[in-house]
Image (spheres, grey):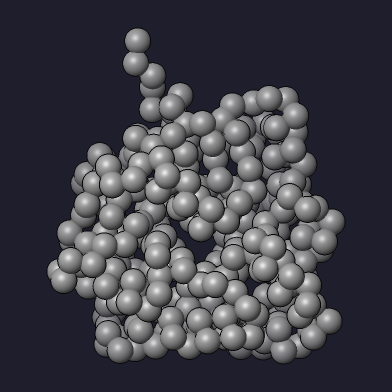
């Protein structure tokens, strides 16, 4: 008797994160205030909970906080070195369709210069979760900028292709391949509009729904689920819910982790058996550039 897709999943890699829009509806100083609250919350959770991890996207989001809070420098450097913080992406999360190839490469070069030279991190995950489309050549640009893997949420139209894979090698026209993860259930996870609404029942409901949906897009027994959203402050209740899930022996296993840890496991499990996609992921949100 064959297993249903969701029954094959053995482990969920929980990735606490926040998404940061460089400019949208606020001034720079107001954005910096938001990020300060988010990172203060992350620092507190990292201090109090040795199992907690955090993913920081975009040097432009971290830099103002870094400059304003020298008291956290050694703490953050320590967590980066210990593998509890992963620095992903580049200087900011760029539009990929309009800027030139050189501009795209410079996003990573300048972001990596801050993340690696100042914080001592190792940047190898392109984290383009809210980008409005991905040109076919982008895998080459990211790979030659030192990226080993790629994460995105927008671009594949699952209503057009219900069998589109979530784990695959993305191959650019020159033959460069980049291990990729499409967040088919989107980059927003476990962040209700009112935090008090996230309880054991709602957590299990969302977790089960995401597993049931995303498992249909992969043969791998592991999935990467985002915990967080746009400008979302990390929720201490995440830790309680994951701990309770583990204490009750629920299946699949849920563990706080980092993108690179997930990808390393995916490589070990799936190797070269993953599908290869040779295409761009466009168009989406038509009218955006008008």
Residue 274 falls in which quadrant of the image?
Answer: top left
Percent of width and height locating residue 269? 41, 40
Q: Nearer the viewer, residue 206 or 1?
A: 1
Q: Is residue 8 above or below residue 1?
A: below
Percent of width and height locating residue 1? 35, 10
Percent of width and height locating residue 78? 74, 70
Q: In the displayed structure, does residue 133 sit left or right of residue 78?
A: left
User: Residue at position x 67%, y 57% from top?
Assistant: 53
User: Residue at position x 38%, y 19% from top?
Assistant: 3
Most extreme residue toward the left is 173
Residue 159 in view (yes/no): no
Quadrant (top left, top right, bottom left, bottom right) of the C terminus:
bottom left
Residue 171 in view (yes/no): yes
Residue 202 falls in which quadrant of the image?
Answer: top right
User: Residue at position x 74%, y 38% from top?
Assistant: 243
Q: In the displayed structure, does residue 123 sit left or right of residue 107?
A: right
User: Residue at position x 74%, y 46% from top?
Assistant: 239
Q: In the displayed structure, does residue 259 sit left or right of residue 219?
A: right
Q: Is residue 78 above or below residue 198?
A: below
Q: Nearer the viewer, residue 10 or 82?
A: 82
């Amino acid at each position: 008797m064959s297993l249903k897709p969701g029954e094959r999943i053995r482990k969920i890699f929980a990735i606490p994160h926040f998404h940061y829009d460089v400019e949208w509806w606020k001034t720079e100083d107001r954005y910096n205030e938001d990020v300060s609250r988010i990172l203060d919350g992350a620092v507190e959770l990292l201090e109090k909970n040795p199992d907690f991890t955090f993913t920081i996207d975009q040097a432009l989001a971290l830099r103002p906080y870094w400059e304003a809070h020298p008291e956290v420098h050694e703490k953050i450097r320590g967590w980066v070195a210990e593998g509890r913080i992963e620095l992903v992406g580049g200087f900011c999360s760029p539009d990929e369709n309009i800027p030139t190839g050189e501009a795209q490469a410079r996003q990573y070069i300048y972001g990596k210069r801050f993340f690696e030279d100042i914080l001592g991190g190792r940047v190898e995950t392109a984290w383009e979760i809210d980008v409005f489309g991905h040109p076919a050549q982008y895998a080459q640009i990211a790979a030659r900028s030192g990226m080993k893997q790629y994460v995105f949420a927008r671009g594949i139209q699952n209503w057009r292709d219900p069998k589109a894979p979530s784990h695959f090698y993305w191959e650019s026209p020159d033959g460069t391949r980049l291990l990729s993860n499409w967040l088919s259930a989107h980059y927003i996870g476990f962040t209700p509009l009112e935090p008090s609404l996230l309880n054991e029942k709602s957590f299990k409901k969302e977790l089960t729904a995401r597993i049931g949906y995303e498992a249909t897009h992969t043969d791998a027994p592991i999935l990467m689920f985002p915990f967080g959203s746009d400008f979302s402050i990390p929720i201490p209740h995440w830790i309680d819910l994951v701990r309770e899930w583990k204490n009750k022996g629920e299946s699949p296993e849920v563990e706080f982790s980092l993108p690179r840890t997930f990808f390393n496991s995916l490589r070990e499990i799936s190797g070269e058996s993953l599908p290869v996609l040779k295409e761009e992921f466009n168009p989406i949100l038509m009218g955006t550039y008008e």
